[in-house]
Image (cartoon, grey):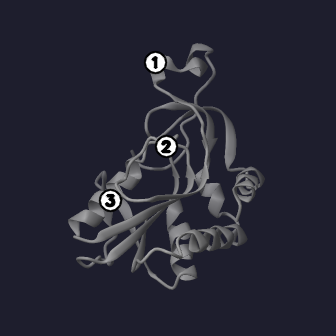
């Protein structure tokens, strides 16, 4: 799946929004990727899974791990496409944890799959969960990387699409200065 095809999927699904948004990171942006819309059409999820399977075929790993909520479906599809085990993390009492009933073994090789990242906050939390289990992370797959290449997870980052979208600190936001109403989308629980 080409970058143009991913862009088209974002637009056609209604996932790419324009307005004034407060991101999970606390920063403000004129654009937002409504990641939950990425999973509303099963055929799109299959295409994303195939794209990751192609880009990650060279990696040696045992299990795919994704954070709840939207990335669960995407990570599951990648695991299915690559015949790997799947585990997800979720927030419990405000902290990211491996979902009850799942486990990671020491030295298991993990590929993290996330939908959209700006600051990498959720991925860093997932990395901490995995490291606490003494498992090894081989890479982080991102459907959309909107970080501007500013994040270092300490492992390879495999984006399907990189978007250079400016995000502002609230006190520097030109949209706030224009009194444009702000929307706080998402459901990260932060």
Report if residue 60 is visible in the image: yes
**Residue 31, image quadrant:** top right
Residue labelled with disc 2: 149
The residue singled out by tag 1 in the image is 171
Residue 185: quadrant of the picture? top right
The residue shown at (66%, 73%) is 46
Q: Nearer the viewer, residue 60 or 19?
A: 60
Q: Are marks 2 and 1 in contact (CB under 8 Å)?
A: no
Count residues near mark 2 (Cα–Cα under 10 Å), then give few for <14, some for 14-19, many for 20+. Answer: few
Q: Nearer the viewer, mark 1 or mark 3?
A: 3
Q: Which residue is mark 3?
A: 127
From the image, state whether disc 2 or disc 1 is nearer to you: 2
Residue 81, relative to residue 20: is it above or below? below
Residue visible at 29% across and 76% down? Answer: 104
Q: In the shown orientation, is residue 119 left or right of residue 162?
A: left
* Number of residues whose C-alpha sits closer than 10 Å to that of mark 1, classed few (under 14), some (14–19) or many (20 or more): few
Q: Where in the figure is residue 140, as x and y percent of width and height?
A: 44, 61
Tell me the quarter of the image containing the C terminus: top left
Indicate whether 23 appears above or below 3: above
Q: Position of residue 2 (x, y in %)?
A: 71, 61
| Identity of the residue drawn at 70% across and 65% down | 1
């Amino acid at each position: 799946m080409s970058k143009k095809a991913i862009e088209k999927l974002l637009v056609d699904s209604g996932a790419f929004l324009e307005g004034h948004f407060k991101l999970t990171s606390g920063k403000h942006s004129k654009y937002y990727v409504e990641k939950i819309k990425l999973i509303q059409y099963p055929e799109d999820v299959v295409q994303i899974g195939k794209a990751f399977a192609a880009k990650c075929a060279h990696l040696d790993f045992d299990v795919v791990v994704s954070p709840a909520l939207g990335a669960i479906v995407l990570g599951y599809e990648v695991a299915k496409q690559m015949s790997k085990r799947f585990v997800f993390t979720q927030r419990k009492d405000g902290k990211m944890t491996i979902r009850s009933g799942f486990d990671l073994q020491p030295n298991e090789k993990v590929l993290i799959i996330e939908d959209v990242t700006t600051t990498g906050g959720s991925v860093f939390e997932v990395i901490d969960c995995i490291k606490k289990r003494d498992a090894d992370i081989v890479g982080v797959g991102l459907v959309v990387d909107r970080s501007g290449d500013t994040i270092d997870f300490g492992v390879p980052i495999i984006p399907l699409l990189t978007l250079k979208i400016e995000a502002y600190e609230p006190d520097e936001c030109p949209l706030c200065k224009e009194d444009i109403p702000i929307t706080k989308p998402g459901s990260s629980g932060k």
